[in-house]
Image (tube, helix red, strand yellow):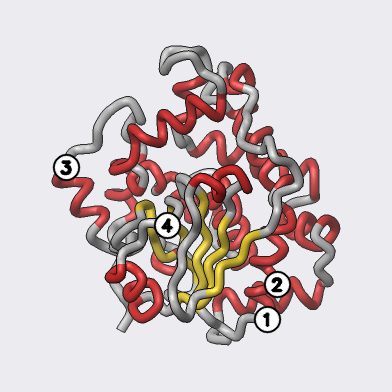
Amino acid sequence: MATPTQPSSNLLALAQTDVSHTLPGPALQAALSQPPFVALPGSFNTRDLGLVPGSPIRPGLVYRSGGSFAGLSAVGKEVLVKGMGVTTVFDLRSARERAKLAGVEADGVEVVWEQPEEEEEALVRLEAFVGGEGEEGYAEMYLGVLAVYAGAVKRVLEFVRDGGGQGFLIHCTAGRDRTGVVAGLLLSLAGASPQTVVLDYLLSRIGTELAREQLLVFARKGSGAESIDTPGFHNLCSLRASCWEAFVEAVDSEYGGFEGYVTNTLGFSEADLTRIKANLVVQG
């Protein structure tokens, strides 16, 4: 029997709450206690991409999350391995982030980390986020993710191609931007509608609520903002459909779409691409 998911309209309404406002406790708890969110002690913003309303990805295959996983409890490790069936964790953090907080260590789990192309990848041009809803800044930042973390993205796709249907998890510090780009790529390759991809993207507004204050501090350091009132900072900390859509347009222009990025930039063949798509939706 399929696992029931929450109505997308309910999730979308909550996810569109302004980041400067605290999410109402009862609504937040209700959302986090049901799919696609997963209760993984010691983490936050954890969810099953296959249980996002409208997702074509097979449930139990691809998980996304936030945090370092260094503080994952014994219960959390058991949930990760036995409850979620995760055998591989892809760490999308920088070397500097990993040096501050190590990653997950759990029996039966392989951690995969690839050195980013640049060490200053976390810095953003805050002025690019000033206009509109920050579309220019997000398109620029997320294109940077595809470039700087190309090696890590390639490792994820190789695993999907060759993994035999085993569960895996991708994460970064917030589980929002770098993880969101990779999750959006996977959903798009699997054939998800643009609306479904955007919904998953926006769900990080809900998933990061419990760590919102810490992440605002992280964003200030990464952007160089003097305060929360610095022009562009509010847009940087917000998640909006228009910003994801601007990024998709930029990917189309820069790479010929996500498939073009996978084949022409990462070097996968058309046969590889076909297998990756199939393995995302069918039992390996």
10 Å crowding of disc 1: few (<14), some (14-19), many (20+): some
**Mark 4 vs 3: CB contact within 8 A:** no
Question: Which secondary structure, mark 3?
Answer: helix
User: What is the spatial separation of the Cα atoms under label 1 and label 2, in whole angstroms?
Assistant: 6 Å
10 Å crowding of disc 2: few (<14), some (14-19), many (20+): some
- What amino acid does circle 3 point to? Gly
- What amino acid does circle 2 point to? Glu
Label ID, residue 70: 4
Q: Which residue is mark 1?
A: 162
User: What is the spatial separation of the Cα atoms under label 4 and label 3, in whole angstroms?
Assistant: 27 Å
Residue drawn at (41%, 61%) of the image: 52
Question: Which secondary structure, mark 4?
Answer: loop
Nearest to the eye among marks 4 and 3: give it.
4
- What amino acid does circle 4 point to? Ala
**Mark 4 vs 1: CB contact within 8 A:** no
Q: Which residue is mark 3?
A: 25
Q: Nearer the viewer, residue 107 or 50?
A: 107
Question: Which secondary structure, mark 2?
Answer: helix
User: What is the spatial separation of the Cα atoms under label 4 and label 1, in whole angstroms?
Assistant: 28 Å
Q: Residue furthest left?
A: 26
Q: Which sits earlier in the primary sequence, circle 4 or circle 1?
A: 4
User: What is the spatial separation of the Cα atoms under label 2 and label 3, in whole angstroms?
Assistant: 40 Å
Q: Is residue 27 shown left or right of residue 210?
A: left
10 Å crowding of disc 4: few (<14), some (14-19), many (20+): some
Q: Which residue is mark 2?
A: 158
Quadrant containing the C terminus is bottom right
